[in-house]
Image: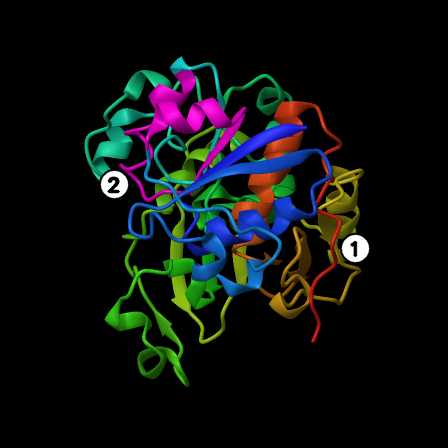
Amino acid sequence: MLNVAVVGASGYTGVELLRILHCHPESAVTCVTSEQSAGKRISDIFPSLHGRCDLVLENLEPVRIAEKADLIFTALPHKAAMEVVPTFLKLKKKVIDLSADYRLHDAAVYGEWYEPHMNPELLAKAVYGLPEIRRAKIAKSRLVANPGCYPTSVTLGLAPLLSHGLIDINTIIADAKSGVSGAGRSAKVDNLYCEVNDGFKAYGVGGTHRHIPEIEQELSELAGKPVVISFTPHLVPMDRGILATIYATLRQKKTTGDLVRLYNDFYKGEGFVRVLPEGQFPSTAYVKGSNFCDIGLTVDQRTGRVIVVSAIDNLVKGASGQAVQNMNIVCGFPENLGLEGLGLFP
């Protein structure tokens, strides 16, 4: 049995980790932390856990936490993670980090979009945790940088096209929409009910969203050359889910059937990527609560563009579910262990 700690358990990704790990037959949560709610039971913060996980939340003391766990999920904001991850690694613990602190390979790029990195030497050791693309490296890693939600949806949506050189990389536009849980659990005026309900708005317009360098890093590696994209996120008045609609100009004439077959071949054997039949497109409603990424696509013969639509649950495949998928790989468990649940519908 693998003993697991969830550091930063009082946020949405934290409680989602606990929900998923409760059904994982090879792991046991032995420690949960929260600086703001230390001393309270986690089930007092999230009544959905009552009678299933009633651990008392602790302060973030890395040495003490490491004594209780073999693997640590750090579900912390950026900067907070890099303050504790080095200690966990020095104590020979495996870490799945859900923050942005170790996703970018270049410390200068991290500094440009966030702030100066406190331990840039670890960036070369961290493995970007997108299993469908980086599985072999993840298996050998002690520090996995769990991908962001938008980057997961966009990268999985474009990977087959970029890997086969089928699109003009200068024409990529990603238009993505997210549920409100993507902004986290902290109180913000922009996320109040009256501010969000009955509304639909763009934010981070003009290439300012912090997920952009992460997306471009991964797309560039797939393409084998630098990729710059236009990316605009939108806030949708729903709890969870991401729908990314991605456009690019094809470099050669292809039919929709050609590309559906390409995607099916590329993702053959991938249990959490579902390529939809020609003429069908995904909805967040059908992946809610699951670790699936559903992908549909079509060729617009009039414009010569391919349109790819991908849907994930931002808290599962976009965060905590993918983190457990990475844990399974790192620890040698079957990759789907604890993650076989279907989406919640309606």
Rendered image quadrant of residue 236: bottom left
Marker disc for residue 57: none
Q: Nearer the viewer, residue 84 or 97?
A: 84
> Which residue type carries mark 2?
Trp
Which element carries disc 1, helix, strand or loop? helix
Q: Residue at x 65, y 47 (%)?
A: 22
> Which residue type carries mark 1?
Gly
Q: From what the image shows, is residue 221 above or below residue 294?
A: above
Picture coordinates of residue 104 (x, y %)?
A: 37, 31
The quadrant in which the N terminus is found is top right
Picture coordinates of residue 220 (x, y %)?
A: 46, 33
Q: Residue at x 53, y 59 (%)?
A: 244
The quadrant in which the C terminus is found is bottom right
Q: What residue does disc 2 label?
A: 113
Distance CA(mark 2)–CA(mark 1): 39 Å
Picture coordinates of residue 64 (x, y %)?
A: 38, 26
The answer to whether residue 164 is visible is no
Q: From what the image shows, is residue 105 above or below residue 147?
A: above
> Magenta segment, which residues?
61-89
Magenta stretch encompasses residue 308? no
Magenta stretch encompasses residue 67? yes
Q: From what the image shows, is residue 346 above or below residue 287?
A: below
Q: What residue does disc 1 label?
A: 257
Do residues under tags 2 and 1 come within 8 Å of each other at their CB atoms? no
Q: Nearer the viewer, residue 183 or 55?
A: 55
Which element carries disc 2, helix, strand or loop? helix
The answer to whether residue 345 is visible is yes
Q: Earlier in the sequence, mark 2 or mark 1?
A: 2
Q: Residue at x 67, y 58 (%)?
A: 297
Q: Nearer the viewer, mark 2 or mark 1?
A: 2
Q: Nearer the viewer, residue 36 or 309?
A: 36
Please tell me how crowded label 2 is: few (under 14), some (14-19), or many (20+) other residues with Cα within 10 Å: some
